[in-house]
Amino acid sequence: MIQPPDDFNPPAGVAEELEPGLRRILAPNPSPMTYRGTNTYLLGRGDIAVIDPGPLSDAHLHAILSALGPGQRISHIFVTHSHLDHAPLAAPLAAATGAPVLAYGGPLAGRSAVMAKLAGAGLAGGGEGIDHAFAPDREVADGAVISADGWTLEVLHTPGHLGNHIALAWNDICFTADLVMGWASSLVSPPDGDLTDFMASCRRLRDRDWRVFHCGHGAPVHDPHERLDWLIAHRLGREAAILEKLAQAPRNARALAEAIYTETPVALLPAAERNVFAHLIDLHGKSEVRAQGALASDTVFERT
């Protein structure tokens, strides 16, 4: 995790203009997992696209609706992924406005085969929690282009943090949701998150030219490629640390987390353990580690 910028502390419920045609409203759900809260974006001048309506909150629903000016209407509601801090307000907002909800799919869409197998064996997700009731009105595929009066968005399927995660490209701006954030590295928690997919999604974004990333939490990222390079290097560094510890002795994810995340607060160690397990699954897939038994959260791994 990097140090969050102290100057990012916008008031919740206030529509702030980020640049012409784009506003941000902070949801009132700060936490160790969401930082100051979820960023909801309003794109457009007439037909408004709402990107990530956020958690179930009457106050936040009122803030979004109150941000509409004369001649404006919400025409599209985009949900980047179905975590509880991004998706639940979509249905009430759709009911209030008549706008369709667009997403890659339901909570299990895009889940990799290895994660589906882990989930089938009983491994439950950790971290932010899934909105299991989420169901979009319209599923959007990778590469889909959606336009309205004054804006065009390209859908980029970017699994890793969650299987149904998408980013949205608007010219040289990318709404990266929880794939890339400025205040912390993204949580990858199996079976919801898949590190192999996460790294591929980061590298996919790295291959394009961007001016700025607007994230699901925290301030805009004005050095997108440097941030992606940091994220990729951070994960490779964590991978190297895991392999180094396993070279000393076989261990499970918990023991590895305790040995590697020595400065992490105790309350965040379960999330660290999930991240380590994600790395172990990725390394297992690359045949760099061997599992002493079936893949599970408490499985002991050894170097190959």
Image (cartoon, grey):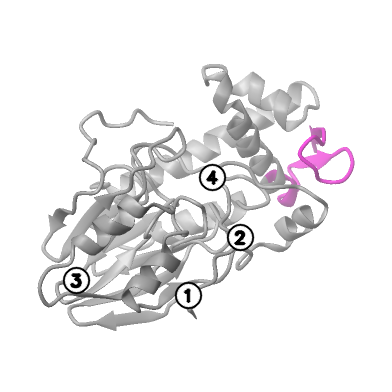
Q: Neighbour class for label 4 at 10 Å: few (<14), some, many (≥20)?
A: some
According to the image, label 4 marks what residue? 128
Distance of label 1 from label 2 (alpha carbons): 22 Å
**Disc 3 residue type (three-letter):** Gly
Marker disc for residue 132: 2
Instruction: Please give the residue where the numbered disc 3 appears in the rendered image.
Output: 44
Q: Nearer the viewer, mark 1 or mark 3?
A: 3
Q: Which residue is mark 1?
A: 142
Residue 205: x and y, percent?
Answer: 40, 59
Badge 1 vs badge 4, beta-carbon distance below 8 Å:
no
Whichever of labels 1 and 2 marks the residue nearer the N terminus, that label is 2
The amino acid type of the residue labelled 1 equals Asp
Q: Does residue 292 show up magenta in the picture? A: yes
Instruction: Write down the region rendered in magenta.
Output: 283-304
Amino acid bearing label 2: His
Residue 210 visible here: no
Residue in the image at 55% along x and 27% along y: 268
Seen in the picture, residue 105 relative to 198 is either above or below; the reply is below
Give the Cα separation between the discs numbered 3 and 2.
30 Å
Q: Residue 257's x, y, as percent?
A: 65, 26
Residue drawn at point x = 26 percent, y = 60 percent: 64
Which residue occupies the foreground of this view, 201 or 150?
150
Location of residue 181 by image quarter: top left
